[in-house]
Image (cartoon, rainbow, N blue to C red):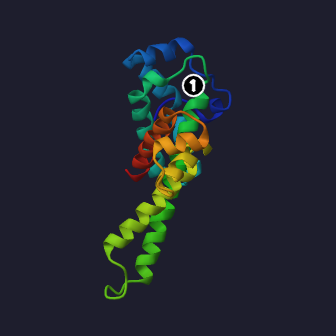
């Protein structure tokens, strides 16, 4: 990766708002300049968090692919560096949590190697899925989490939730749709 050196990470300037407008408008040249400006520092940041050079390379690439796919959401009036490093931090946390789940699964598999005694593969997949859903729900904003749990644990429909929380039914439906997307993303 080319771009920033270790010394200029600390004094690195944010990308200009004009460059961000070009990115948002689909400029490949702006995207390439932003990539060259930030890729090394994002990679090092993720590597420090994950303690894995390979994971850092993969996550960095995924972040920049997502950046291109979501370029319309970039706000030139806000700090792009803050935006990018928040995405990087969240991606590293997702990786670490996934590794923990995977480690627990492997540990369980090693301790329960006897096929006649241990649970089926389907049960283990269901257990891992439940844990990933739990992680996704725990990360939700308070209101979305509350609405999701009222719907899935209490079995309340959007109208009943809206009445109880004194919000519109549309707000409840929007939170539920977003919650489902977040869970689906975690499971992928």
60 or 91: nearer the viewer = 91
Question: 12 or 94, which is in the foreground?
Answer: 94
Q: Residue at x 44, y 22 (%)?
A: 72
Residue located at (50% from left, 38% from top): 172
x 57%, y 30%: residue: 83
**Residue that badge 1 annotates:** 80
Residue 27 lies, in percent from the top left, at 39, 16
Where is residue 44 shown, x and y percent of the image? 55, 42
Residue 160 visible in image: yes
In the image shown, does 4 or 13 lie closer to the viewer? 13
Kindly state the secondary structure of the residue where label 1 is placed.
helix
> What quarter of the picture does the N terminus occupy?
top left
Q: Is residue 172 above or below residue 102?
A: above
Residue 132 appears left or right of 166: left
Mark 1 crowdedness (10 Å alpha carbons): few <14, some 14-19, many ≥20? some
Identify the residue at the far right of this view: 11
The image shows residue 96 at horizontal and vertical percentages of 52, 55
Whole-percent x, y for residue 87 in the image: 53, 37
Counting labels gives: 1
- Relative to 98, is 69 above or below? above
Residue situated in front as seen by the camera: 118 or 79: 118
What residue is rendered at 36% in x and 88% in y?
A: 117
113 up-or-down from 40: above or below? below
The answer to whether one can see residue 141 in this image is no
């Amino acid at each position: 990766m080319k771009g920033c050196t270790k010394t200029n990470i600390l004094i690195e300037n944010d990308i200009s708002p004009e460059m961000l407008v070009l990115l948002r408008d689909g400029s490949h040249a702006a995207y390439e300049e932003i990539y060259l400006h930030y890729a090394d520092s994002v990679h090092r940041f993720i590597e420090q968090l994950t303690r894995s050079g390979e994971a850092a390379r993969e996550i960095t690439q995924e972040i920049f692919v997502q950046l291109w796919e979501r370029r319309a959401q970039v706000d030139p009036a806000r700090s792009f560096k803050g935006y990018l490093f928040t995405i990087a931090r969240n991606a590293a946390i997702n990786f670490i949590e996934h590794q923990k789940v995977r480690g627990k699964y492997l540990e369980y598999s090693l301790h329960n190697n006897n096929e006649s005694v241990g649970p089926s593969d389907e049960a283990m997949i269901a257990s891992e899925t439940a844990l990933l859903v739990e992680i996704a729900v725990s990360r939700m904003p308070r209101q979305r989490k509350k609405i999701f749990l009222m719907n899935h644990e209490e079995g309340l429909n959007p109208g009943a939730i809206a009445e109880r929380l004194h919000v519109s039914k549309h707000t409840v439906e929007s939170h539920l749709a977003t919650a489902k997307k977040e869970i689906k993303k975690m499971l992928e």
